[in-house]
Image (cartoon, rainbow, N blue to C red):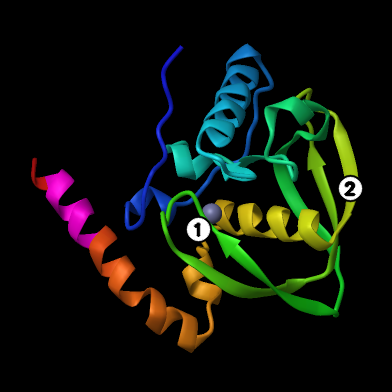
């Protein structure tokens, strides 16, 4: 099995179009499992396929961020937001594609999701608070939207030097 690696900003794969999952096979299950493993080892709570360089509409998360709580794992294929609350709240977020950067992001408090599971079956989920926030962050990724796009101008200004460092490191890797 190929080893997955986290794709860092400003890699263009984070902005590329993500195509729907069409085949529910062992390869898909292996990919989802490898994403969960990488998420845990990176101390994250969620990961979207484009963040491992796979431009498909697949995401995984675990609000506990802990392998010991594997019962909390959620794997979603082709998710869609069926409904979201008008009520929104700011909350602290980080992103594995943006090491060291954190910001407070405004998100709906509750969300209803329609998706297919890892077995290809239809599922409907209603999430709130932290779980809704994690989902919405990962869901943005499969639409090529990054949390820097949703930062307040003040937070974006604070993040700017770190973003500059990531852009520099990306160019250095590309040139070597
Ligand atoms: Zn992210």
* Residue 96 appears in view: yes
Residue at horizontal 32 percent and vertical 52 percent from the top? 11
Q: Position of residue 25 (x, y in %)?
A: 66, 16
Give the number of the disc on residue 49. Answer: none
Q: Is residue 91 left or right of residue 49?
A: right
Q: Position of residue 85 (x, y in %)?
A: 87, 73
Q: Position of residue 134 (x, y in %)?
A: 69, 54
Q: Looking at the rendering, which quadrant does residue 173 occupy?
A: top left
Residue at horizontal 18 percent and vertical 60 percent from the top? 168
Q: Position of residue 175 (x, y in %)?
A: 9, 46
Q: Is residue 124 left or right of residue 120?
A: right
Residue at horizontal 53 percent and vertical 66 percent from the top? 147
* Secondary structure state at the residue bearing disc 1: loop
Cα distance in 3D space between marks 2 and 1: 22 Å
Q: Which residues are magenta?
A: 167-174
- Residue 108 magenta: no
Along the viewing direction, whichever of 115 and 8 lies nearer the viewer: 8
* Secondary structure state at the residue bearing disc 2: strand
The correct choice, above or below, for 89 with respect to 100 in the image is: below
Q: Is residue 122 left or right of residue 35?
A: right
* Residue 55 appears in view: no
Give the number of callouts: 2
Residue at horizontal 51 percent and vertical 55 percent from the top? 95
Crowding near the residue tagged with mark 1, few <14, some 14–19, many ≥20 C-alpha atoms within 10 Å: some
- Residue 169 magenta: yes
Q: Which residue is mark 1?
A: 144
Q: Which residue is mark 2?
A: 125
């Amino acid at each position: 099995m190929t080893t997955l690696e986290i794709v860092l900003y400003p890699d263009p794969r984070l902005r590329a179009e993500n195509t729907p999952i069409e085949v529910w096979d062992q390869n898909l299950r292996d990919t989802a499992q490898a994403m969960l493993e990488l998420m845990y080892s990176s101390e994250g709570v969620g990961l979207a396929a484009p963040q491992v360089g796979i431009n498909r509409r697949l995401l995984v998360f675990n609000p506990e961020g802990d392998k010991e709580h594997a019962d909390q794992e959620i794997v979603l294929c082709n998710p869609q937001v069926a409904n979201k609350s008008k009520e929104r709240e700011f909350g602290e977020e980080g992103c594995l594609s943006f090491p060291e950067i954190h910001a407070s992001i405004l998100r709906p408090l509750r969300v209803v999701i329609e998706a297919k599971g890892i077995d290809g079956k239809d599922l409907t989920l209603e999430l709130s608070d932290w779980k809704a926030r994690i989902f919405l962050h990962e869901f943005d990724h499969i639409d090529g939207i990054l949390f820097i796009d949703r930062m307040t101008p003040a937070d974006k200004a604070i993040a700017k030097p770190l973003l500059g460092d990531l852009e520099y490191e990306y160019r250095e890797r590309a040139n070597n």
